[in-house]
Image (cartoon, grey):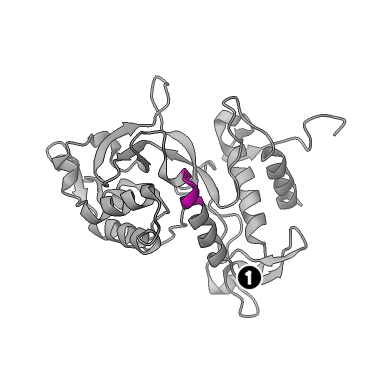
């Protein structure tokens, strides 16, 4: 079974590190996302500076960073935890009107910012950690119009951003208090238990599976290889993932492994015709 094999591959990757010493794949509840800019806050919640987080290539690209897993935005407004696009984190996005963009590079995105703000204030305001409190103060005081007043670079518009405290390396989402809080969010999100078709264990079942990104011809936001988004696809009155029950842990593992394989820099993917073809070995060594 392909999904079971991907889960085994994830477990192998989770024990390995890359050339920088970082884990090859994130742990449960986290995801490797392209984060282009770091918003550096002081302890009072003021924006000290913004720092690019880009590769040193001829054409710099946002670096991958392990962050709390993103929300699956099929529709509606859903903020991510402690990171997001500028439309959410700062309330601004690139002006889609090319004729106006030179004079006015950004447009306000107040609904997404208000959702991001309220989501974090509800979660963080009673937490005493100084980094989380700094973020609360920032969100309480920030207005989308401040983007121009602070003279922030237009290049960061629509990029994913993360927050840090006092210096770029002190990332707020990596604080112990933030990780503990996120673990609680994951637990409260877990669905009803059932028998997982991959592991054979009784466990919380994933209603929606994480997105698969990097497939040839696919959407940049990603797609799914297991989904039931129309009533005709369902049976016995079951909804979404309950039609083919896969546990939260297994869904995370197989999608994380597949996303790892699809990244070109990992050399496990070929485009053959109009198909992305991935490949991997069952073990690191023949004796395994």
Residue 105: x and y, percent? 18, 40
**For the image shown, how many numbered marks are present on the structure?**
1
Neighbor class of circle 1 (other Cα within 10 Å; few <14, some 14-19, many 20+) is many
Q: Residue furthest left?
A: 103
Q: Residue at x 72, y 64 (%)?
A: 196
Q: Main secondary structure of the magenta part?
A: helix
Residue 97: x and y, percent? 19, 45
Magenta run includes residue 115 = no
Q: Is residue 100 left or right of residue 283?
A: left
Q: Quadrant of the C terminus?
A: top right
Q: Residue at x 19, y 49 (%)?
A: 107
- Residue 272 higher or lower than 19, as above or below: below
Residue 8: x and y, percent? 74, 46
Q: Is residue 285 left or right of residue 80?
A: right
Q: Nearer the viewer, residue 86 or 146?
A: 146
Which type of secondary structure does the marked residue at label 1 adopt? helix
**Is residue 97 something that shows in the picture?**
no
Q: Nearer the viewer, residue 8 or 172?
A: 172
Q: Residue at x 48, y 38 (%)?
A: 65
**Is residue 206 something that shows in the picture?**
yes
Range drawn in magenta? 174-179
Q: Residue at x 61, y 73 (%)?
A: 234
Magenta run includes residue 178 = yes
Q: Residue furthest bottom?
A: 237
Q: Is residue 196 left or right of residue 19?
A: right
Q: Residue furthest top?
A: 58
Residue 235: x and y, percent? 64, 76
- Residue 220 higher or lower than 102, as above or below: below
Q: Badge 1 is on which residue? A: 242
């Amino acid at each position: 079974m392909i999904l079971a094999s991907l889960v085994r591959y994830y477990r192998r990757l989770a024990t390995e590190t890359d050339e920088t010493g970082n884990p090859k794949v994130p742990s449960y509840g986290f995801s490797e996302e392209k984060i282009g800019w770091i918003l550096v806050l002081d302890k009072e919640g003021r924006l000290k500076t913004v720092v690019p987080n880009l590769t040193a290539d001829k054409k710099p690209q946002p670096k991958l960073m392990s962050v709390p897993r993103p929300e699956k935005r099929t529709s509606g407004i859903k903020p991510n935890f402690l990171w997001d696009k500028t439309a959410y984190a700062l309330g601004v996005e690139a002006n889609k009107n090319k004729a106006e963009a030179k004079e006015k590079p950004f447009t306000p995105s107040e609904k997404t910012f208000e959702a991001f703000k309220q989501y974090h204030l509800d979660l963080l305001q009673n937490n005493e950690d100084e980094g989380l409190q700094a973020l609360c103060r920032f969100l309480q005081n920030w207005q989308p119009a401040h983007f121009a007043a602070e003279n922030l670079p237009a290049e960061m518009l629509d990029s994913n951003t993360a927050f840090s405290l006092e210096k770029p390396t002190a990332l707020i989402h990596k604080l112990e208090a933030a990780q503990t809080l996120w673990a609680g969010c994951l637990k409260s999100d877990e669905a009803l238990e059932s028998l997982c078709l991959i592991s054979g264990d009784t466990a919380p079942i994933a209603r929606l599976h994480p997105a698969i990104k990097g497939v040839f011809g696919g959407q940049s936001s990603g797609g799914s290889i297991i989904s039931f988004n129309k009533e005709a696809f369902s049976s016995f009155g079951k909804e979404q993932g309950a039609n083919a029950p896969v546990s939260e842990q297994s869904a995370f593992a197989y999608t994380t492994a597949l996303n790892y394989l699809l990244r070109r820099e990992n050399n496990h993917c070929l485009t053959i015709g109009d198909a992305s073809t991935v490949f991997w070995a069952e073990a690191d060594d023949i004796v395994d």
